[in-house]
Image (spheres, coloured by chain):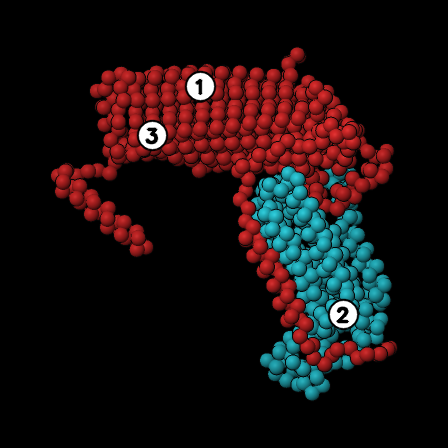
Chain colours: A cyan, B red
Amino acid sequence: MNTLAPHSPARGVSSAVSARSFAGGIASFARREFRDSIASRWFLLYTIAFGVLAVGVSFLSLSGVGSHGFAGFGRTAAGLLNLVVLVVPLMALTAGAGTIAGERERGTLLYLLAQPVSRSQVVIGKYIGLAGTLVCSLCIGFGVSAGVLAWRTGGVGVGSYAMLVAFTVLLALAMLSVGTLISVVSRKPSVATGLGLFVWLTLVFVSDLGLMASSILLKLRVQEIFGLAVLNPLQAFKMAVIVNMNASLDVLGPVGAYASRTYGDSLSWMLATTLVLWAVVPLMLATLLFARKGAL
Amino acid sequence: MRSITIAILASLLMSSVALATSGAREPTSRSVALIGAMIDAADPGSTIHVPAGIYTGNLIITKPITLDGGDATVFDGLGQGTVIDVRAQRVTVRRCVIRASGKDVTGEPAAVRVSAGSATIESNTIEDALFGIDLRESPDSIIRDNSIRCKDLDPGRRGDGIRLWWSHGCVIEDNTVRGSRDMVFWYSENLRIRRNTVTDSRYGLHFMYSHDTVLEENVLTGNSVGIYLMYSNRITLRDNRLTNNRGASGYGIGLKDCDDITVTGNALLANRVGMYIDNSPSSIGSTGLFKSNMVAFNEIGLLATPNTHDNVFTRNSFVENEEPAATHGRGRLDSNVFAKDGAGNYWSDYAGFDLDHDGIGDLAYEPRSLFGAMLAREPNLRLFVHSPAQRAIEFTARALPELRPEPTLTDPSPLALPQDLKLTGAHPRRPTAMGVLALLLLTFAGGLAFFLARNPGVIAPPQGVTE
């Protein structure tokens, strides 16, 4: 396992060895990141917070008349959706923002870079470690919440629930990627966290409110509103979940109906692709910038 | 594969046995002219038990007679014209399979067309029809217990599952219609329409200029609109169940220019709009009564044009609708009455209280959703429902009273509790599958954690390193 030990073979001797050591380097960093996350207790905090909220939403939505298991756009689903849109980007952005910037401030970054690994390995490894941590955290929250739903026998269908989990993971990966980019460009963790919160606020509130205002003031057409809205990963996530639950976006009024009519069955894939791009592109940028910019 | 082979062999064997015993070649399908000849030979009013088999072509019945297919007779129009054309009074067609009408819209081909009164069309299975059962000026007829499946065409190209035209006093009950355009009633009065099921069609039940009718216990699911009444007066809608009607208009119940409508005990669930009221009642002195309906899980519970007035809403339950009540365009619904004899309606978003426990909230219900008011002006903003931005807007409106819109309506005595929701046909629940999913997720989380928590190698950070 000690691929990063000083006596490990130098990179580039043969492509097979190099590929293995490249992946091995990433894996080591990922594992280390995971252990650090648990040690620093943010993982525990986030898991408990998300789990309690998810179970709370499930319980609340199962009380009263909603408990008859009638699925329209079920209110369990709506509740979980609202929760995820608010909380998961916050978790992922702050976790990502702290990663490199934190090491930088603690002075451990130089030590890490002294290891015989490339800088891209450091960034990608840390990203994967944090991603694993987040996915664990989300799966525990959703798992316990699904347990509550099963026990009380109600709520949304199993398939839609699984899709909600899958898209939430995708959203977390996308936001973590943005957070990592923030971390790379920030000198101090406090700056990184501030920037992360700013991005969160922008994606959650400002961009939607701005789009609402401009759609009224500029009299945007439905296709323009849809095009702009889908750029926001949170909107893409919301639409993807609703499409998979209702087979149509008509819940979202004229704009949703337009999207369903125009893109039909490919809409779901399109939205998923948007989220994947949000996960891949900022991470690539972060890797490139970190490789160029260096430790300080 | 094997079972198919065995089935083919068995049928070959049986047909060869039949050949050997009868000595004559038995065609799989015969001309419907055979039945025509049987009808010609029969006395008026008698019953013909049609021999089992497939009869192809178009049958015209011009004599009062009962045709009983015994659930083993198929009339196949071979995709041409109307399959059974009834042109005499007091004809009964019962227990037949009737299929493959023409599909050219100009002749309006139907599986069964009746153009004389007092017909009984009962317990038939209709498939691949443009129009299903079409009554033209056929009063006092009965359409009962038929299963109708229309041609699989674009909704605009389909025909009506059941259509009545100038046919008073008919009974339409226990029919099942799937994938048609409408079940539509033109200029037909005093009908009884009971226990029909319409799914995947355009308008489940559609009334045009048809008065004095009772619609009871019908089930309308997955249509563009459940029940749409237009220019029809004195109609009672009772105990119908309208779910998931979410087409372009997507109303559970839609009323356009209808006077003296009574809507009681219906369940309107998960439609785009539960009840839509457009200028009803339209005449001076007439009213509309909406009582004890369950309006739940719709995007909009009650939607009405601003000119709507003189409707009475009492003892309805508005539960978990995205918007409980909204105006179609600007304006308010305050020309309508939301309480009768001291009993208002249950609103699940009511924030008041019932301190004296008399079942009536102590404060009036006055919904003032700023986002709802914005939606009324800018329908495109519906894209932003279920978003934190929507909540931010509502919060702002609560914090800054000058931003709060006028209430859309006032219910002076809102009910503290909803009526019982009888959801017999709710979606099946699968607790086991959900439990398995819960276990899977937790196991996955545990496995991932175990995998990642293994020894990371030598790069654990050294203690006490400083820059």
Label 3 chain ID: B
Q: Determine the CA span between mark 3 and mark 1.
A: 20 Å
Whether labels 3 and 1 share one chain: yes
Label 2 chain ID: A
Label 1 chain ID: B
Relative placement, left or right, of A53 versus B46 is right
Q: Secondary structure at mark 2?
A: helix
Task: Looking at the picture, tell me which residue is in the foreground, B106 or A122.
Answer: A122
Which residue does the numbered mark 1 point to in the structure image?
Answer: B170
Task: Please state, as top left, top right, bottom left or bottom right, where the C terminus of chain B lies in the image.
Answer: bottom right
Q: Is residue B336 visible?
A: no
Whether labels 2 and 3 share one chain: no
Identity of the amino acid at label 2? Answer: Ala
Task: Please state, as top left, top right, bottom left or bottom right, where the N terminus of chain B lies in the image.
Answer: bottom left
User: Residue B34, how many percent across, how many down?
Assistant: 23, 27
User: Residue B96, how many percent across, how many down?
Assistant: 33, 30
Which residue does the numbered mark 3 point to in the structure image?
Answer: B95
Front: mark 2 or 3:
2
Q: Determine the CA span between mark 2 and mark 1.
A: 77 Å
User: Residue B397, how many percent across, how many down?
Assistant: 82, 37
Identity of the amino acid at label 1? Answer: Cys
Identity of the amino acid at label 3? Answer: Arg
Q: Secondary structure at mark 3?
A: strand
* Residue name at image x 39 percent, y 34 percent: B127
Q: Is residue A157 visible?
A: yes
Front: mark 2 or 1:
2
State yes or no: discs 2 and 3 in contact (Cβ < 8 Å).
no
Which residue does the numbered mark 2 point to in the structure image?
Answer: A39
Crowdedness of circle 3 by 10 Å Cα count: few (<14), some, many (20+)?
Answer: many
* Residue name at image x 44 percent, y 29 percent: B175
